[in-house]
Image (cartoon, coloured by chain):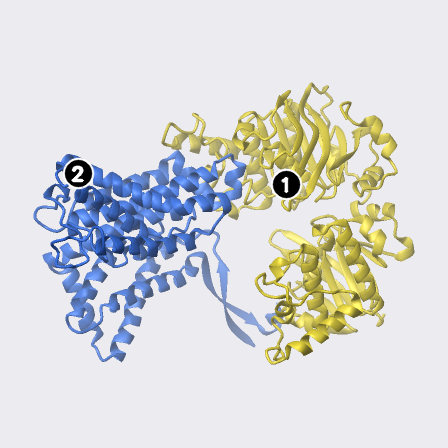
Amino acid sequence: MNRLTLKLEKRLTPSPVMVFIIPLISVLLALLLGGIFLVLTGEKPLDVYSLMFVDSLGSKYGLTETMVKAIPLMLTSLGVSLAFKMKLWNIGAEGQLYMGAMAASWLPLTIPSLPAYIMLPGMLILGMIAGGLWALLTAIPRAIWKVNEIITTLMLNYVAILWVDYLVYGPWKDPNGSNFPISASFSEAARLPGLGDSRIHAGLFFALVLAVLLAIVFKYSRWGYSINVIGSSERAARYAGMNIKRNILLVMFLSGAISGIAGMAEVSGIIGKLQHGISPGYGYTAIIVAWLSKLNPVAILIVSVLFGALQVGGYAVQVEGIPAAVATMLQGAILFFVLGGEIFTNYRLKLIRQKGEELSK
Amino acid sequence: MNQSLIQLRGIVKKFPGVLANDNVDLDINPGEIHAILGENGSGKSTLMSVLAGLYKPDAGKILVNGAEEKFRSPRDAIACGIGMVHQHFKLVEPFTVAENITLGEKENSFFLSNKELKTRINELGKKYGLEINLNAKVWQLSVGEKQRVEIVRMLYRGSKVLILDEPTAVLTPQEANELFGNLRRMASAGCAVVLITHKLNEVEAIADRVTVLRQGKFAGVLERDQINAKEMVRLMVGRAVASKYDRDSSPVGGVVLELDKVNALNDMGLPCLREMSLCVREGEILGLAGVSGNGQREMAEVISGLRRVESGKILLNDRNISNLSPRTIIDLGVAYVPEDRLGMGLVPDLNALENLILKKYHQPQFSGRWLLKSQAVVRNAETLVNQYQVKISSLHQPVKVLSGGNLQKLLLAREISSSPKLMVVIYPARGLDIGATESVHKLLLELKKRKTAILLISEDLDEIFKLADRVGVVFDGKLTGDFPVEQADLEEVGLLMTGSCSARERVNENEPAHT
């Protein structure tokens, strides 16, 4: 008697083919799963998807909007990827973005008359410091008492968002703003220059520079090497004489600072003022983007554009009466399938034919 | 033959590269306390995990009351009345004692009234003298109490055979005594108690019978009236000392490492080194024998700066290095091969290139102010891999795919290439096959020739007698013996390892002058 059984066998090294193929298949499966839901709600999935595609990537306007959404995703994703590299689970990019935006707004709101060459660098530095300190607040208890940073970074998100709300509903509210939760508009000097006359702003330049910088740090630098060792095995790092506490503080600060840049770029490049709800959750989506990109800075740039497009597509179908949550659902489904598919990079599926007598073996 | 409650016949269990159990037989009778004795790595825990249904044996039979049973999971074993208390407790800390005891019960304990449950547990408690507060949360309990919860849980599930894996390792002496009293009561009530241990004094104190394992094989069984330390040591370490290596007889130099009355605490904050004093000289191998858990690992960590020295001094070439940072100590020329090769000595997910610069990546030879010198890194790895004959298919592969022997060669290559003044190695050949063991030993002798002082910490007396110039014995965080190897006697060292005091007088004469 012959019997066929499936067996998972561990691969000695992750399969490079699978690393490439799985994200592609995952996107297809996510679209399929999303399609089922759309059919169940009485929509035609192909129409919805093509609408999403055309509106996000098929026109100049769509492309611009996609890039506008991609820029804060790139920055926050780069920020969290730095922390993730050391296995510090900073999921507080959202709050760090808000604090960066808040601190950057303080300068034009307090001294509106500064010239651009002082205003913009000043806003950038303030945004970085605020985002960095906000992250550092969780790094200190983590370094000293091993307080779980997942919880603390997450909790501080709400504090940061509500703090900005307090400011724009209270002390920073524009007295001429018909009572909306909006600060006064920044002066022209506090606005990041755009690409030509489009809404794509210099934040894109920050993201590109940071991506290249991080790629070099991760791959070729002495510091990147020690982050890598600490992330892989803290015991080995200690044994090798590395200063783990100092690196926790440094990495968390820089991780938060990069998200702070995202906040600065949003208020300075897009909105031109501080207001309620400046981010639709970029800092959370960043976690997915960083993970899907396997913490590769260049991949982060590409995946951010894809997720930016999803978001724009989601807004587009909303006009047709379909909830924008379609986009969020697809984001979740893609991550779900990628994580599920990861087993095939580390294991191979083997079909085994067993003879009757050998069954017990 | 049928009187035995449990019979294990020809148990074989293989792990990748290791034969953990090789054709082992074991009989357990009701009402006895049965000790399973052996060094670390002799296969005790594996054998008991097979009996408890955690591992499936590759060959062999388990008979319960004479009938063959096949365990697919611990649940099957528990159904046959076999329960195991692990070294690391499997308790849910935020839950109460009562909840932990009933956890995972199949019968609807959900509907079992609290009162009924408590009476049942209290009855058990009274019967065996195991009293516990059922309403306490587990995280509030001391280690000894947690262990009691584990035991009661197993009894509550109707265990007739109770396996305890090194139960005293985490206990204070008072707690251990109390535990032994309880175990005795259980045995008199008809339970069989199986005690995994490597401590001879425990076996002498409590066991009715002892089965000794050596390197995964059955080495012998002793009845109550045959149990004595000498006989057990003979079975544990064997007698055959293999041929010695060609020993370099050049004279040793001055003192390189000196420990002067060093005290230190273990991870649980208990004293693990007590007034430890020893010294190692240039070009000398001091072989430190001892059953693991007597402060060896902590001593290596204290020397390499990974653990705080509470009091006392550590001198490296007359310079006090106690409580300096690990990096300073590395840079002063202390190399350390830890027992945990993969995870501490080497980073599993990094490749050979990266692992081979682990301690020197910050030095000018491998990096500038910011960037690593990748060519130097590659050249370093190619040279070392060739020179130390590490079998590796690619320098870019994570090192976790390498075999134990190649891992150890890689680790030694890195440590030796730093031309250390002092080398600390723990259990360098543990888990390695004969060929790999020999190359590791040759590397150490080569290093000795180059005038490095070597502190060799090992449980394997063969290894120590083959390599060491002097033999020290460590027990309970103290040096209890120190002999030139020519004067050391295998059995005497074995006895000292177990804390037996018969040779004390001789020890005092031979201890270093400063004590």
- What element does badge 1 sit on? helix
At x 18%, y 69%, the residue is A318
**For residue B267, what is the image quadrant?**
top right
- What element does badge 2 sit on? helix
Q: Nearer the viewer, mark 2 or mark 1?
A: 2
Q: Observer-nearest residue: A99 or A143?
A: A99
At x 68%, y 68%, the residue is B153
Do the residues at pointers 2 and 1 share their chain? no
Label 1 sits on residue: B436
Figure check: A50 above or below B180:
below
Q: Is residue A201 rendered to the left or right of residue A262?
A: left
The amino acid type, in three-letter code, at marker 1 is Ala
Residue B76 rendering spot, x and y as whole percentages: 66, 72
Figure check: B460 above or below A301:
above
Residue B52 rendering spot, x and y as whole percentages: 69, 65
Label 2 sits on residue: A119
Quadrant placement of the C terminus of chain A: bottom right
Q: Which chain is blue?
A: A
